[in-house]
């Protein structure tokens, strides 16, 4: 007689077959109805085995709870006190067996730890009169439980999943922008570690300063011109017009008392008809500032620079200068030798060393207006500024945003030549957002006076127009594009994935056929 008798529904045979193999692997003899000898009476054999078994396991399922045979076998085992019922799905137990402790094996899998199965093994050993027998088989790794043919298909599946993800993963595109515009607005990268040179070095015929609160400097000497002696024909003052001034302090400050009267200070060279006029060292702009550049006249010799978000600046000049002061108070000087006027011109001699002119302004200023000397238009005004946004639009007559471009432009993709290039027309109201590691390489006044020539380079995730269209929408770069056009990386990835998976599958297939 067998140690264990299994009672079950024939519809649950696949589960029972795996279960029997696990019990047999522990050294127990297991009988189930597939072992009826040829020519023997079906009923007689089952009865003999049922009455002779030391342990009867009933596999309750939605099929077996409806089987009279299974319920009869379970009742017999219960009378003999050798019944060990197990539940293999979410079936409801027959009424007469609900009070019998039943182990749930619903989630049991061969080779995986399971509390209910471990307790069943102990109960079997108790009925058989011995200690639980340790399982002679080890838990097989997942790759041994998977059919080798499935392993051979892993490279295709893995590559398909990865490629699908890479094709949906949009990444920033490395672009280069070159265009001509009458206006550009940009935000300086806030994470920049230090201020970046913005203007200069350059030679200007004059520099106007507006929206300031104070302008301070330390002169060696100062003179003031009598406005009554101004020569209209020569557009200058005669030598007799200049009167020396006494300094009451080492520091002279120009203050804007009434902003409604538009205070303005213009810096010129000592001879406004001579060239060069004044030389300015580079001026720095702080991270996070917003800068707007606009051309000021058709000849392209004038520029307006608006800086918001930076409250102090320093200008450095290397020679005597003239200061034309309009609607601003001058402190640090003795009384004027003539009646005070709303506009006065001062001649300032600075120390021989490079002297700084400190400008303090509100958060939305200041506004600098350089007028360039002859031959300055083709010289870069500034370069090397990291930015996060660029906008090439201007407010139209009806308040709408219109294009500020004055000529054609082009967008290229240095790292991905296959994407081609995008032509920008004069009417495109264009802007660049979500820039990363993007730098304005150069800004200069066009030689033909058509505006500002700008060259920028870096990563851009969005390029917008007035209508919200993205000019590079058909050239959208994904991570798959980046991988595909990096030949070495793509080949290496394919080789590693294919060789590893195919080798593992081939080994398992070889082992399968060797049996």
Image (cartoon, grey):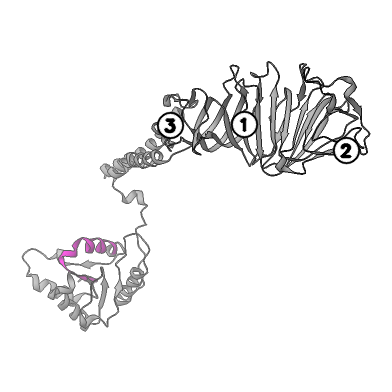
Q: Is residue 445 above or below residue 137?
A: above
Whether pointer 2 and pointer 1 mark residues with C-beta atoms closer than 8 Å, the reply is no
Stretch in magenta: 3-22
Which image quadrant for residue 328? top right
- Of residues 201 and 215, which is closer to you in this image? 215
Q: Nearer the viewer, residue 27 or 456?
A: 456
Label whose residue precedes the other's in the sequence (2 or 3) = 2
* Upstream in sequence: badge 3 or badge 1: 1
Residue 501 image position (x, y, % from top left):
36, 40
SS at mark 1 in the image: strand
Q: Nearer the viewer, residue 364 or 171?
A: 364
Q: Is residue 65 left or right of residue 104?
A: left
The image position of residue 189, as x and y in percent, is: 62, 39
Relative height, residue 55 to residue 300 (above, below):
below
Q: What numbered label is drawn on residue 251?
A: 2
Q: Name which residue lies at 34% across and 38% down.
A: 502
Q: Seen in the image, is 96 located left or right of residue 294?
A: left
x and y percentages locating residue 93 in the rendered image: 23, 77
The quadrant holding residue 335 is: top right
User: Does residue 196 appear in this view?
Assistant: no
């Amino acid at each position: 007689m067998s140690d264990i008798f299994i009672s079950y529904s024939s519809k649950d045979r696949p589960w029972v077959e795996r279960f029997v193999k696990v019990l047999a692997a522990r050294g127990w003899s297991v009988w189930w109805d597939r072992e009826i000898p040829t020519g023997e009476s079906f009923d007689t054999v089952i009865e003999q085995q049922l009455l002779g078994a030391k342990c009867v396991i009933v596999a309750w399922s939605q099929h077996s709870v409806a089987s009279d045979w299974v319920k009869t076998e379970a009742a017999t085992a219960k009378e003999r006190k050798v019944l060990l019922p197990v539940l293999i799905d979410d079936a409801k137990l027959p009424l007469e067996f609900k009070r019998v402790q039943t182990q749930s094996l619903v989630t049991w899998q061969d080779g995986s730890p399971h509390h209910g199965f471990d307790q069943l093994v102990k109960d079997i050993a108790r009925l058989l009169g011995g200690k639980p027998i340790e399982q002679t088989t080890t838990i097989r790794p997942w790759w041994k439980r998977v059919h080798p043919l499935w392993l051979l298909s892993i490279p295709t599946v893995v590559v398909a999943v990865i490629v699908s993800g890479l094709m949906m993963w949009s990444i920033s595109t490395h672009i280069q922008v070159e265009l001509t515009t009458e206006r550009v607005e940009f935000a300086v990268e806030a994470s920049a570690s230090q201020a970046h040179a913005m203007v200069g070095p350059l030679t200007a015929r004059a520099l106007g300063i507006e929206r300031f609160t104070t302008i301070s400097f330390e002169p060696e000497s100062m003179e003031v011109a009598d406005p009554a002696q101004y020569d209209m024909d020569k557009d200058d003052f005669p030598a007799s017009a200049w009167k020396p001034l006494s300094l009451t302090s080492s520091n002279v400050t120009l203050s804007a008392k009434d902003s409604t009267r538009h205070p303005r200070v213009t810096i010129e060279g000592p001879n406004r008809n001579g060239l060069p006029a004044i030389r300015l060292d580079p001026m720095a702009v702080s991270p996070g500032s917003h800068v707007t550049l606009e051309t000021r006249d058709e000849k392209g010799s004038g520029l307006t620079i608006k800086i918001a978000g930076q409250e102090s600046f320093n200008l450095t000049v290397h020679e005597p200068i003239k200061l034309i002061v309009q609607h601003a108070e001058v402190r640090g000087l003795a009384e004027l030798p003539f009646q005070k006027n709303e506009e006065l011109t001062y001649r300032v001699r600075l120390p021989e060393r490079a002297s700084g002119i400190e400008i303090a302004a509100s958060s939305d200023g200041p506004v600098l207006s350089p007028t360039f000397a002859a031959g300055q238009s083709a010289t870069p005004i500034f370069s090397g500024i990291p930015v996060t946004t660029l906008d090439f639009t201007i407010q139209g007559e009806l308040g709408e945003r219109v294009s500020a471009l004055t000529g054609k432009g082009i967008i290229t993709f240095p790292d991905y030549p296959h994407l081609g290039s995008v032509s920008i027309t004069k009417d495109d109201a264009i802007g660049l957002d979500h820039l990363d590691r993007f730098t304005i390489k150069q800004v200069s006044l066009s030689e033909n006076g058509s505006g500002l020539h700008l060259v920028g380079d870096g990563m851009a995730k969005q390029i917008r127009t007035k209508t919200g269209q993205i000019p590079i929408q058909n050239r959208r770069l994904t991570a798959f594009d980046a991988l595909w056009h990096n030949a070495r990386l793509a080949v290496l990835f394919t080789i590693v994935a294919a060789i590893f998976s195919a080798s593992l599958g081939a080994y398992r297939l070889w082992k399968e056929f060797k049996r």
